[in-house]
Amino acid sequence: MKLSTKGRHAITAMMELAIRHKQGPVTLADISVEQAISVSYLEQLFARLRKSGLVTGLRGPGGGYCLRRPASEISIAQILEAVDDAVQSPAVGADVTHASAEVPQSMRLWRQLSGRVYGFLNDISLAEAVEEKASTEETPKDDPRFGAGYHHQDERSAA
C-alpha cells in the first residue's frame, strides 16, 4: 500500500504537534519550516483535521494548533481518514445493501484486505509513530537489526 502525499504530510504534521506538545500551540509556519510543506497546503490539511476533531486551533498571539487528545489516543488510520477521502473504516466502506452471495469474490477479497490494512494502521498510535521516529534517528550504524550491510546515506556517498 502506498500512502498519498496528503496522508504522509498529515501524519508528519501531526507528529510535529505530538513532539512539541509541551511547548504549547504550534503554528503552521513552524510546521512548514520543519517539514518543508507549504503553509497553504497545511491550512487545507488542518481544516480537515480540525473538522475531524483531531486538533484544535487557538487564535491570536501565541496561537497555533494543538492535539485535541493525547497522541496515544490518536491512530494513524484516524489521521488518514480525516484528510484522505479514499481511506475509510471498513464499516463505513462496506455496502450492507448487498447480500454476501451477490458480491463478487474479488470484491470480498479487496474488502478483507482493506480491512486488514485499516486495522494495522488503526493499531498504530501517533505516540508510537513518534517513538519509532525517535528510535530510528538514534540508531547506531552497527545496530544488528539492520545487518552488516547497513550504512547511513552519507557514508555510502563518501566511500
Image: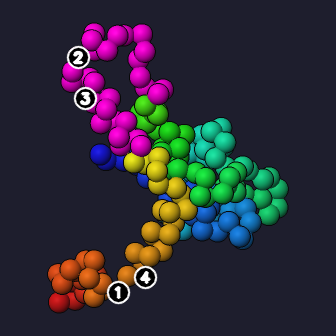
Residue type pointed to by label 1:
Pro
For disc 4, the marked residue is 138
Q: CA distance from mark 3 to mark 4?
A: 40 Å
Q: CA distance from mark 4 to mark 2?
A: 48 Å
Q: CA distance from mark 3 to mark 2?
A: 9 Å
Main secondary structure of the magenta stretch:
helix
Mark 3 surroundings: few (<14), some (14-19) or many (≥20) residues within 10 A? few
Q: Which mark is residue 140?
A: 1
The x, y position of residue 131, in whole percent, is: 50, 69
Q: Nearer the viewer, residue 48 or 90?
A: 90
Residue type pointed to by label 4:
Glu
In this view of the protein, can residue 39 be seen by the observer? no
Residues tagged 4 and 1 counted as in contact (Cβ below 8 A): yes
Mark 1 surroundings: few (<14), some (14-19) or many (≥20) residues within 10 A? few
Residues tagged 3 and 2 counted as in contact (Cβ below 8 A): no
Q: Quadrant of residue 154?
A: bottom left
Residues tagged 3 and 4 counted as in contact (Cβ below 8 A): no
For disc 3, the marked residue is 109
In this rendering, the label closer to the viewer, 4 or 2: 2
In this rendering, the label closer to the viewer, 3 or 4: 3
